[in-house]
Image (spheres, rainbow, N blue to C red):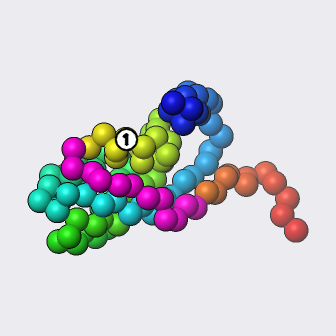
Amino acid sequence: MRLGTFVEREHQAVRPHVENICGVLVHVVPARRHQVRQALEAKPGVEVHTMTDDGKMVVIVEDAAGEWAGSIITSFHDVDGVLSVALVYHHFDKDLEGEIVP
């Protein structure tokens, strides 16, 4: 899969100081929502902001030590009970130290 190859290649690349903050909507099987929440919150850089009884979760994902936010989000699909994952917000900030900004 091309996406998997891209994520793997990007994960191995030396990174400048960057910061990714992502808002993700995760739809899960309602009966498994508590187990899915625990599994997601066990991942580095992940915080479940809110969860509804019908299986919708708003999740915040940030880069973690040695792992891009994108690869963390991709791993959500491997959690049993996850039906869909949608990126709804993305903030990317590169370290501007040393640059002249008018």
Residue 59 in the image, given as x and y percentages of width and height: 36, 61
Give the residue type that dot 1 points to. Ser
**Based on the displayed image, in which of its 4 quarters is residue 92 positioned?**
bottom right
User: Relative to 3, does residue 59 appear above or below in the rendering?
Assistant: below
Residue 71 in the image, given as x and y percentages of width and height: 46, 41
Crowding at label 1, few (<14), some or many (≥20) Cα neighbours within 10 Å?
A: few
Q: Number of numbered discs present?
A: 1
Magenta segment boundaries in residue numbering? 80-91
**Based on the displayed image, in which of its 4 quarters is residue 74 positioned?**
top left
User: Relative to 95, does residue 4 appear above or below in the rendering?
Assistant: above
Residue at mark 1: 75
Point out the residue furthest to the left here. Answer: 31
User: Relative to 100, does residue 3 appear above or below in the rendering?
Assistant: above
Magenta span has 96? no
Residue at position x 28%, y 67% in the image: 56
Q: On the rendered image, what quadrant is the C terminus found in?
A: bottom right
Residue 46 in the image, given as x and y percentages of width and height: 35, 53
The overriding secondary structure of the stretch rendered in magenta is strand
Residue at position x 85%, y 59% in the image: 100
Point out the residue furthest to the right here. Answer: 102
